[in-house]
Image (cartoon, rainbow, N blue to C red):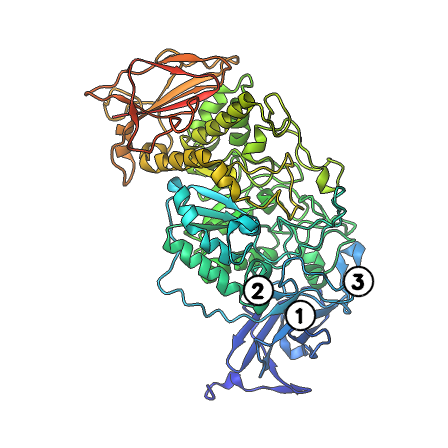
Amino acid sequence: MLNRIDVYPTRRYGEFWLRPGRPYPFGATIVPGGVNFAVFSRHGTQCWLVLWRKGERTPLAEIPFFDAFRIGHVWAMVVFGLEHEEIEYGYRMDGPHRPHAGHRFDARVNLLDPYARAIGGRDVWAAPADPTNPQRFRGRVLLDDFDWQDDRQLEIPAEDLIIYEMHVRGFTRHPLSGSRFPGTFAAIRDKIPYLLELGVNAVELMPIQEFDELESNFFNPYTGQRLVNYWGYSTVGFFAPKPAYAATGHLGMEADELKALVKLLHRNGIEIILDVVFNHTAEGNAEGTTISFRGLDNRTYYMLTPDGSYYNFSGCGNTLNCNNPVVRNLVLDALRYWVSEYHIDGFRFDLASILGRDAEGHPLSNPPLLESLAHDPVLGKTKLIAEAWDAGGLYQVGSFPAYGRWAEWNGRYRDALRRFLKGDLDQVAEMGQMIKGSPHMYLERGPTASINFVTCHDGFTLNDLVSYAEKHNLANGENNQDGANDNHSWNWGHEGPTDDPAIMALRRRLMRNAIAILMVSQGVPMILMGDEMAHTKQGNNNTYAQDNELNWIDWGRLAENADLFRFFRYCIAFRKAHPALRRRYHLHERDLIDSGFSDISWHGLREGEPDWSPHSRTLAFMLCGMHAALLPGRTADDYIYVALNMHWEPHTFELPRLRDGRRWYRFADTFRPSPDDIYEPGHERPLRTQRNLPVGPRSVVILVGR
């Protein structure tokens, strides 16, 4: 090492030896003999590196970046002899303070490094904050030395994915979870056998990048307790996993704990997708706390009005200026880092339409950031999923700039399925399109562009969707004004829990209907954690602030709802068993192989006569499994017939006549009580009659022809 010329300092400041640093990569990087610190500011005039010993309030040192340490708009220096595991760091930046011109520099404020790969200050969940501490968050120097062995991204084909949306804390925080370290990455490892039993092969984690759970200003009116930022959609640092989500976070080992989780998930064939929030930051509006970006270069990082105010397309006070080249590089650098250092398989982008706006908020026809993400070489095999709308009214479901790469949370699928389940008028034709993989929206992209779901973290759970006609959000402290009003839900005769056996049976049937339709739809299905055991949020459809049983999965409900869990599990297994349900390319509604049947054919109460009229509430379709052999890497499949009756009266469907001695077998009938409502795939029961199929009111029947 001593043969390297760059390990020698060029100047001394106090007890610290220094030399000009490398301007890239940004952040704190371990180099021979020391640590390289690099930070950007276009409009800053003077910068200081602030060092602390871990946990101490008084800085160890404040070292100025000398003129020789600045290259372009980057301050960079190497500090030699630092015990990188024992220090924390930040910056102070001087410059003009002219808010009307977009500048908010304040040299008195200690600032977090936007590229900090580890962050201290919230090591333990909801630990009381010290109001006198001027720097709540400090960067830590991270040595990325985890032994991945041969682990890599799984690259599961999108059409084969079954996504399970999960909150790290909520999944295991409940006392009945049985976890040794509840609410942590480590606890998820203990639940991998459960995920395998359920059958999912991807988990989508709600935000795990560092955020401040104590930033909420609302109080629960029932208990008087201060609420928290539970969901985490308010990022403090884009490169750092949240220490409070790690059992070892107080030891600074959160990165290794997360990597160990990823490695074990991969070993069990489960991908990990991160929900990322690049549309705004935790700094809020002009009244918010300066943490990092505002104090380093407010005018670069944020969308500003001509008078220096913050555009608010996020609904959270500010909007990141994502198509500024510097901010664009920040996003790319962060995602590349998560893929290369954490082996993340995909990302779901919160309010992704913001990523396509220019500096003044106008939608761009060819957004540089979205194009860069789609064509980035490091992200080349990474799944990109957009929440294709934002709080500024831009709704791009079906029209998000895709560049052949992007998939979308299909909010139109969610709404269509909910309304169809409820028996609303004029829904059959729309539901038919959704079942086909939404070709009216994704004709060129294919079915895998559609992430199909009926519930997600934002809104009612599946149980609440069939139990409440209205939202009940008073516990959020906002007078029930928060949360969506257009839920397309219904209570079926009683608001909330009931002991009426008829209502209870109907609700169970509707939940089974939802998962059955979801799993036979072309596209990529996503289910919300806890739906498989009828988790309830007691009618609250916006539990962003609730760190309690509303969000914690009650594992005691698993035994209480074993029949529902079994139905979920078999529906997932059925999808996995039938390649006809997992198409990469759209169906043609034609016979392409002379089988005598189209790849998909539509039916009604009579064979070949679907009723697409506005008053219809019935629909059936058949997939010719022989066509599956045309798909790359697939073999011929069985025939699949699905009858959907959302009418309140029973109906009899005329079945298509199969050829070559094939017969119809019943896989699922949601009208039947458990255990006859569903059978293990491969063990379906033959129908007594092969020509007519009775379907109960508000029910789904799935048949297999072999």
Q: CA distance from mark 1 to mark 3?
A: 20 Å
What residue sits right under mark 3 in the picture?
Answer: 97
Give the position of the C terminus as an image quadrant. Answer: top left
Label 3 close to label 2 by CB (< 8 Å): no
Which residue type carries mark 2? Answer: Gly
Examine the image and state in which quarter residue 424 appears.
Answer: top right
Q: Residues within 10 Å of mark 1 (few under 14, many from 20)?
A: many
Counting the numbered discs, the total is 3
- Mark drawn on residue 249: 2
User: What residue appears at the point 71 percent right and 46 percent down from the top-left corner?
Assistant: 311
Q: Position of residue 63 (x, y in %)?
A: 69, 79
User: In front here: 46 or 551?
Assistant: 551
What residue sits right under mark 1 in the picture?
Answer: 90
Examine the image and state in which quarter residue 704 appears.
Answer: top left
Label 3 residue SS? strand
Farthest left residue? 660
Which residue type carries mark 1? Answer: Gly
In the image, taking residue 385 as reference, residue 706 lies left or right, namely: left
